[in-house]
Amino acid sequence: MITRILSLAGAAVLSAALSTAALADITILAWPGGPAETALRKVVDKYNETSDSKAELLYFSRDNFFDKMLADSAAGSKEFDVMLTATYNVGKYAPFMVPIDDLITDDVM
C-alpha cells in the first residue's frame, strides 16, 4: 500500500516538475533504502522509458540528508531540481519552496 502511494506521489511530482521546462532533464535528491527508494526508482525508470527527457536520482546518506537539503537550499544550489522530504520537515524548507499550482493539470491528477 505505501509503495503504491509513493509511486503515485512520485509520478505526480515528476509530471509537474518536468512540465516546467519543456521536458528538460531533472535531478531528484533522495535518500537510499527502504520502500521510498524502491517506489521512486520504479517511477523514474518508467518515466525514463516513456519520455524524451530524463530524470536522475541523486542519493545522499540519511545521516545528514536534511542538513544537506537545508544548506543547499539556503545557498541556492542547482545540484538538484526536486527533493524528497518528510512531511514533518516541510516547514524548514518553506522559504525555499516554489509554488507548482499552475503546473498541476487534470491529466496529472
Image: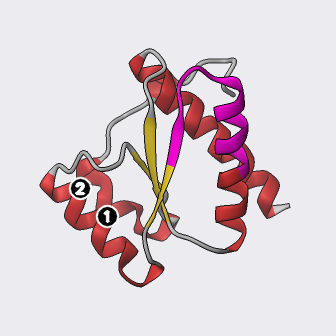
Q: Is residue 46 magenta?
A: yes
Percent position (x, y) of residue 37? Answer: 64, 63
Type of amino acid at the residue the image marks with label 1: Met
Point out which mark residue 85 bears: none
Main SS of the magenta part reads helix
Whether residue 83 is situated above or below residue 25 in the rendered picture = below
Percent position (x, y) of residue 65? Answer: 39, 73
Q: Which residue is mark 1?
A: 69
Q: Which residue is mark 2?
A: 73
Percent position (x, y) of residue 41? Answer: 67, 53
Q: Is residue 57 left or right of residue 50?
A: left
Q: For residue 68, what is the image quadrant?
A: bottom left
Q: Residues within 10 Å of mark 2 (few under 14, many from 20)?
A: some
Q: Report how many numbered discs are placed on residues in the image.
A: 2
What's the distance in space between the residues labelled 1 and 2, CA to CA?
Answer: 6 Å
Q: For residue 8, what is the image quadrant?
A: top right
Q: Is residue 8 magenta?
A: no
* Labels 1 and 2 touching (C-beta < 8 A): yes
Magenta-highlighted residues: 42-56
